[in-house]
Amino acid sequence: MEKPVQVKPIVKLSQNFLVRFYSALVLVPVFGLFIVVGGTYFSLFIALLGAIMTWEMATAIFGGDRNLIVVFASVGIGVFIFLLGTKVDFFWISAVWVFFIITLLTIGGRSKLFGTTVLFLVFNLFIVIPSFLIIWLRGTEELNTVLWIVLSVVATDIGAYLTGKSIGGKKLAPKISPNKTWSGLLGGAFFSVITGFIFSWVILENQIKLMFLGLLIAIVSQMGDLLESNFKRKYLIKESSNLIPGHGGLMDRLDGHMAAVSFFALIKLVNDNVLV
């Protein structure tokens, strides 16, 4: 008598996946709430996220024993991002930035870390610029557009995880991120395109264009993830922090969003009617 065939589940829901899922159930509504509210509260929220990511980056670059540099850098960047998102005169924003740079370089120089401090300031542009751009987009674009960008990246992450785990296959960049596969890239892109299709009925814009932009956002967001993975590899760290259960730190969670926001903002600067 033949043994019954056992059907293997396409994706085994590991404990890590469930932790990630439950964390997302909390994070997505919180992020969505501040996006919906907008205004000063949204700017303050983004500034807080920027400060936390700066703390993660500073801790990785300087080490946990350089508390003065880490704290000053985190608070300084948070304040600067918030000012960028408000209507404060550009002169005062520039003055705060110059004061921050000079003070941080002075602290770094006295700690014999001047070169490392300069490197940190360059790397930190990858936090400051996207933070400003998403505040700018929230102020210039419809609410649904910003939600579409954010949810497209979320869909990309989910699609990449599910297809990568179930199909596997050739590695995308084994030396940078061994767990990423080409199947995951394609699966993430597919999920993002579907998100664009769904939102085309909400935003009431060109369906084909929104789906195509969803494809590009998926690719760019995953490249942003690889860029952050390369940074972590350089400084021999597995995760930027343990702030979010199952996800690691904010940089681990938001790297794709920062890349996607920057990409869309660049397109909008070139063509203000990009979604028409």
Image (spheres, rainbow, N blue to C red):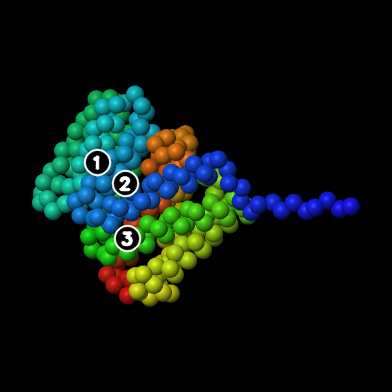
- The residue to which callout 3 is attached is 146
**Seen in the image, is 116 located left or right of residue 5?**
left
Task: Write the residue at 20% across / 42% down.
Answer: 79
Task: Write the residue at 49% across / 61% down.
Answer: 191
User: Would you say the residues marked 1 and 2 are in contact, meaning their CB atoms lie under 8 Å apart?
Assistant: yes
The residue most toward the right is 1
Name the amino acid, label 1: Ile
Disc nearest the viewer among 3 and 2: 3
Give the distance between the C-alpha atoms of the residues marked 1 and 3, in whole angstroms: 23 Å
Q: Position of residue 173 (x, y in %)?
A: 54, 49
Task: Write the residue at 32% across / 60% down.
Answer: 146
The kind of secondary structure element at disc 3 is: helix
**Residue 222 in view here:** yes
**Seen in the image, is 93 located left or right of residue 67?**
left
Between 252 and 65, the one nearer to me in the picture: 252
User: Measured along the vertical axis of the image, is residue 80 above or below residue 105?
Assistant: below
The kind of secondary structure element at disc 1 is: helix
Give the distance between the C-alpha atoms of the residues marked 3 and 2, in whole angstroms: 18 Å
Q: Position of residue 262 (x, y in %)?
A: 33, 57
The kind of secondary structure element at disc 2 is: helix
Name the amino acid, label 3: Val
Task: Write the residue at 21% across / 30% down.
Answer: 106
Give me the disc on residue 77.
1
Disc nearest the viewer among 1 and 3: 3
Neighbour class for label 1 at 10 Å: few (<14), some, many (≥20)?
A: many
Between 153 and 100, the one nearer to me in the picture: 153
Q: Position of residue 28 (x, y in %)?
A: 38, 51
- The residue to which callout 2 is attached is 127
Disc with the residue nearer the chain's start (1 vs 3): 1
Between 110 and 139, the one nearer to me in the picture: 139
Neighbour class for label 2 at 10 Å: few (<14), some, many (≥20)?
A: many
Q: Position of residue 136 (x, y in %)?
A: 24, 58
